[in-house]
Image (spheres, coloured by chain):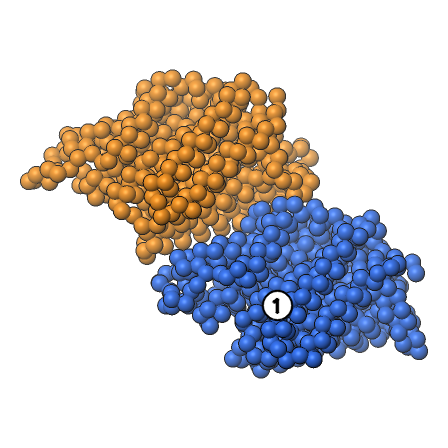
Chain colours: A blue, B orange
Amino acid sequence: MDFLILNEGFRTLSALLVVPLLGALVLLTTSSASFARFWTLLITTITAALSLPLYWGFDATTAKYQFAEHLAWIPALNINYTLGIDGISLLLILLTTLLLPLCVLASWNYIKTRVREFMICLLIMEAAMLGVFMALDFVLFYMLWEAMLIPMYLLIAIWGGPRKVYASIKFFLYTLAGSVLLLVAIIALYLHNGTWFIPMMMGQEYSTLFQTVVFLAFFLAFAIKVPMFPFHTWLPAAHVEAPTAGSVILASVLLKMGTYGFLRFCLPITPAATLTFTPYILALSVAGILYGGFTALAQSDMKKLIAYSSVGHMGFVTLGIFVLNTQGVEGALLQMINHGVTTGALFLCVGMIYERTHSRELDSASGLGKFMPIYVTFLAFFSLSSLAFPGTNSFIGEFLILVGAFTKSKIVAGCAIPGAVLAAAYMLRMLQRMIWGSKPNPHPEILSDLSLREIVTLAPLLVFVFWIGLRPEPFLSVMHTSVAHLLAQVHQVTPQVMTVGTLLP
Amino acid sequence: MIIESPQLLFALLAPVVGSVLVMLTKNKPNLRETWSFLSSVAMFLLVASMARTVWHGDTLHYTLFTLLPGLSITLRADAFSMVFALIASFLWMLAVFYSMGYMRGLKEHAQTRFNACFALALFGAMGVAFADNLFTLYLFYEIVSIVTYPLVAHHQDEEGYEGAKKYIIYLTTTAKGLLLPAMILIYVLTGTLDFAPNIRDGIFSGDINSSLVVMLYIFCLIGFAKNGVMPMHHWLPGAMVAPTPVSALLHAVAVVKVGVFSTTRVMLYVFGTDTMSALNLGIPTAYFVSFTILVASIIALTKDNLKARLAYSTVSQLSYIILGAALLTVPGIQGGIVHIANHAFAKITLFFCAGAIYVATHKKNISDMSGLGRAMPFTFGAFALASLSMIGAPPVGGFITKWYLLIGALDANQIGIILVLLTSTLLNVAYFAPVSFKAFFGKPPAGEPYAGIKEAPLSMVIPIMLAAIISLVVGIYPDFFMHFVRTVTG
């Protein structure tokens, strides 16, 4: 096929799906908690190791889908098992595989009950998430997309905090509501094209009305996942109640599903509608940036603070995507990775405090500087990264997004700037409270500094903070061609299709 | 000639290494202070050896990281950087000695954190001095804000937290809210953030919308809030809660000088004198900062707390530097730049004196210091000498500044600016002269209140005397710094 570079030899992508699932199967046969921990660590590490050759073998000069695999699955319905990755999904896959071993390490002592089941959920989650980024057949995609929901629901509902039932149901209902419309859009596209193959759906002549409706269905599903303001209310609840590993996966990978959906489906399949709705989406993005910033500033619960900061950060990502120029989209893609690294690390940090004090309140974590110097050092660097301090990863992402935004519209970019100020405000506020605090810590005796396991959990993320921050080229170079191709697809809209604008007030 | 040299990097790393060693040896105060001192000496020697190269008209250059095309972390040492780098690294050595005496004299807590952050502040200041582009400048500018926060909040009481909060809010809000968008817009418009090679050209080409350039200029002028230009100066008096060595460092070396250095660097090397005069930005700026010069002096008059008076004096004096550059005449720019050095030596002397008085007597208010000069003649002698420099009287350093600024104002045909300078000089006399006069000639309070009082420890008095003497030397032999300054103006 024209769109794929089929993989000869070892099927890496399939292996990434199969290894975690097999690992989960093996876990079913055992009941030992410590075996489950070591085994899951091993499996996730193997998966991470398997994914690294994707980067080395990646051909950055083509926009085609690489390492592709194509097998007939249900020929009667024309459904295939098609996998492939391009410059847009490559880094997200690596982020997922590299993050999972850290999630296992973070759950080492945190999860005390039903360890085996917890690890099974993690492994299924990993396979489903990787599958979403790799699937090129819409049915396969949708199946994996829905499959992610279940282990995530269980992670929150079983191992969550006091309000876990409320949070998990809310999470489930919100995302399910979005997915239903997604399914409708997918079927509509199938009826129009007669294929489930995603790349074939791009660049087709759809009627104005069709594009608009499909775009809106896509948009709702993905905007809930991102989450964009005003669809964000499930996020703080889910984050607060989820166990550390759940929060990390939620923040670092699941939120990226939404923005990945925008890039993979909305932009190339319904470009005219994208152009029409751009101003509204930019407005929502800016609203999200400001709303997330202000709300984060008012939180006294650390997890809520970081959850709202995610709303703001993801606002920057959607801003970057919908300015529809090279810097904006590349910045958005990079910022997706950065947010995964930094916010994931911050949730790990909060989890480590929670393990000691069993509280997420800022006040119970005040004045840590004296007792936990190593911890505080990590926390300081990750917080600085989160507020886009120059030299860290988020700065490059935010810089590119704002360059793209200023190129498109100075007003829009100017409106987003206060979001950067707010990020500094709430992060420095948190840092000040946690390192020094206005009053002494209530329980200094339980504040032991980080153990080796915890340092090993955080250190790789710190490496990425500075690696991306100081040498972003290896990360940007893999996306150039794919992003250029994507933008060409968007801007190829014929004037006749542009009349979609007349449908709107 | 441009020479690639990793020496720049070594000079930057000296304080970082020092800071790490300080943290590692926190249980051995003597060893810890030795590391501080050694790293300050190492940095000064490295800067001095680079200064020799720059003296002969060469420029040192070193690229650390290239992030994106046109966006890199690159260092350069040219004549302008050298003025700032030399004083900052030299005064750090004095400050290390002085703060040792001060902190131990008052048995302050958290001396390790204090020393470590002090060194890192110098790292930031040095990075600003050696920045080759706006991004590098911004990076180190922000580093200075972050690492000086623990210094300002040092006492960790309510007052300390309030002052530090104000400090960080003013500095990061202006940096993120104004400098960041200005930097990004400049990058969007020109595709680069590198400083121009000289002070005339700037980096804007003629076809860029001029009202946009004016807006960017205003963003930069206000955005570098460390320069203390009103109305963004409130953080400075608030930061007075810090221990006195920090105030001295803040006011003479690291923070405010970073602010004015950055402002003038951007005025001259990003916008350039050609663009500034074409868009008529210079003289309005001069009048804008004149407001700060006069009003801050008037506020200083009302302050009885010695450190507060010095703080407002700093606010006022910093604007001299920007005023000089804004005149856009060669003598004006020279006067502005050389004031970075002249003000530094004099102001650090004054703050050192305030700290010495506090350590020896625990007095903060000027009204309580009547007759104290007889008990502490060296301290108050140095104070008087440095006051002369602030006033701009010969033969102390400040006179050189005033001389060039006045010529610059004459060249620019700005009678108004000359009046501002003269008025400000009178105000300087009005708020500085009484301090020394009362100390030496005022009556001590009844009884024998100064019976047990003598000079502060030697480790404080020696740096004070050195700084005061240098203030005098740069007044009598101004040629050392003027050589660099003349290279800047070409």
Q: Quadrant of residue B157?
A: bottom left
Residue A349, image x, y percentages: 52, 62
Disc 1 packing (10 Å; few <14; some 14–19; many ≥20): many
> Looking at the rendering, in which quadrant would you find the N terminus of chain A?
bottom right
Residue A18, image x, y percentages: 77, 70
Numbered disc total: 1
Kindly identify the residue that appears in the image at 54 percent across and 39 percent down: B137
* Whether residue B51 is visible: yes
Kindly identify the residue that appears in the image at 40 percent across and 19 percent down: B478
**Could you say which is closer to the camera, residue A303 or residue A415?**
A303
Above or below for A221 versus B359: below
Kindly identify the residue that appears in the image at 42 percent across and 31 percent down: B41
Residue most extreme to the left: B447
Kindly identify the residue that appears in the image at 35 percent across and 45 percent down: B28
Secondary structure of the residue carrying numbered label 1: helix
> Looking at the rendering, in which quadrant would you find the C terminus of chain A?
bottom right
Identify the amino acid type marked 1.
Val
Q: Chain of mark 1?
A: A
Q: Left or right: B169 with respect to A147?
A: left
**Could you say which is closer to the camera, residue B265 or residue A446?**
A446
Above or below for A425 versus A117: above
Which residue position holds label 1?
A104
* Whether residue B275 is visible: no
Q: Quadrant of residue A149?
A: bottom right
**Could you say which is closer to the camera, residue A141 or residue A498?**
A141
Above or below for A231 versus B55: below
Residue A354, image x, y percentages: 49, 69
Q: Left or right: B197 with respect to B285?
A: right
